[in-house]
Amino acid sequence: MKIITAMLALIAAVNGALAQTQTLSARPGLVNYVEGEASAKPPAFINAGETFSTGNGKAEILLMPGVFLRLGDNSEIRMVTPSLVDTHLELLQGEAIIEAVGIIRGSQVSVADNGAAASGAAITIAANGLYRIRGQSAAVYSGNMEVTLGGQAIKLGKGRQTQFVQPIRSEKMDMDEGDELYAWSSVRSQYEAAASYQAARASAFSGQNQTGWLFYDVFDTWAWLPQRTFFSPFGWGFYPSGLAGSAPVVVCTVLRGGHWGNRPRPIGPVRWYGLGTTREVPIDPKHPPVLNFVAGTPRVQQQMRSGEQVSFVSRSGGRQGAAVHGLVHNPVRVTSASSGSHASSGGVSHSGGSGGSSSSGHGGGVIGGGGGSHAGSHK
């Protein structure tokens, strides 16, 4: 009887794993996640010639596999060519951050900045990294890009930016500049890595070992399953199905998104608000990410990642496949994403997350808040 029960449980588990994923048509332009106001909700596609915009809100759009486009408030894009080799789009207004994790040789993302001033700048991204295009400027958090304006072209590397004014020149970017879209992108990067890891485990368990974009209903999002291991600019890992079981992971708070705010006390410290839960997330063991903390500037992100590198090595001994509980920085009260109940977080809690606080918005804590619409939800 016990053997039959165990076999039935195994069959149910396999069927569950198979039901959790479905393959997405390999076509850039899927609206994967929206918080706040937007012209379309997930799972809409932005076809060639179509525009997509946000109001008081943010959005995540999937481009080629492993490349995420994130738009800030009051931003608008037009899809020119949804190609897997050369995705070409226009930024008509506002701000965009591109997180490129899986760009392969011979492919690129091209962005024309045709904003309010109609600068006509063209940006080409052919390397993995993190990039910002805003107003009349482009900046490289990591990686490298080429910017062309009026027949003049320059290349920008890590920590450099340029203004779309002739003659264009490379300048040092301000690493202390606060940016909510930057913080939101770091949160979404972790969420995507967590979804990818869980989907990869399910795919391996079912024996399918899938690759590409797959919908994973546990996270209510499209997850990217790569053919080989990649690491995001924020330090999260994306592992193929065959290697997910041996990936180094941490157990930490994972948020869907969120925003800076000082609720419920208008005069209280600025914190990061968002819905979260506790999950295993794969990481880059050589350059671990920030855990349980939302950094609002590149400098804070860099400083805290240096601290996490020492902490991770001491807690895991550098072992591959080691599940390590993340440290909690400045714990606060949190809200469960599933039950809505409150819990006092003195460690890594299964009901939410935590973080620090800062009046300047350079760091933040998770204290609960509104969610958004994912690609699998028709909200």
Image (cartoon, grey):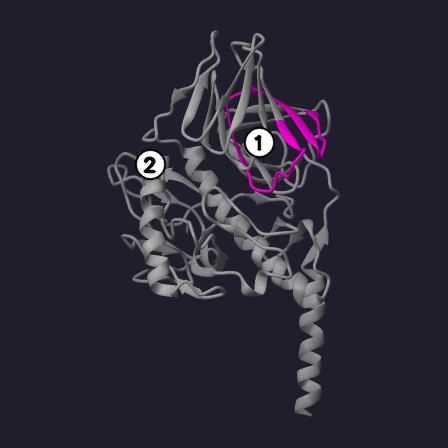
Identity of the amino acid at label 2? Arg
Under circle 1, the secondary element is: strand
The percent coordinates of residue 193 (x first, y second) are 53, 51
Q: What label sits on residue 38 in the rendered view?
A: 1
Between the C-alphas of marks 1 and 2, the distance is 30 Å
Quarter of the figure with residue 103:
top right
The residue nearer to you, when weighing 29 against 275, is: 29
Considering every residue shown, the one lying at the far bottom of the view is 1
> From where the camera sits, is residue 338 visible?
no
Q: Are marks 1 and 2 in contact (CB under 8 Å)?
A: no
Q: What label sits on residue 299 in the rendered view?
A: 2
What's the residue at 75%, 43% (across, down)?
25
The percent coordinates of residue 257 (x first, y second) are 47, 44
Q: Which residues are magenta?
A: 80-109
The residue nearer to you, when weighing 295 against 234, is: 234
Above or below residue 178? Residue 302 is below
- Magenta stretch: dominant SS? strand
What's the residue at 70%, 70% (across, down)?
14
Q: Earlier in the sequence, mark 1 or mark 2?
A: 1
Q: Of discs 1 and 2, which sits in the foreground?
A: 2
The percent coordinates of residue 313 (x first, y second) are 36, 60
Instruction: Residue 238: say if magenta.
Output: no
The residue nearer to you, when weighing 191 against 225, is: 225
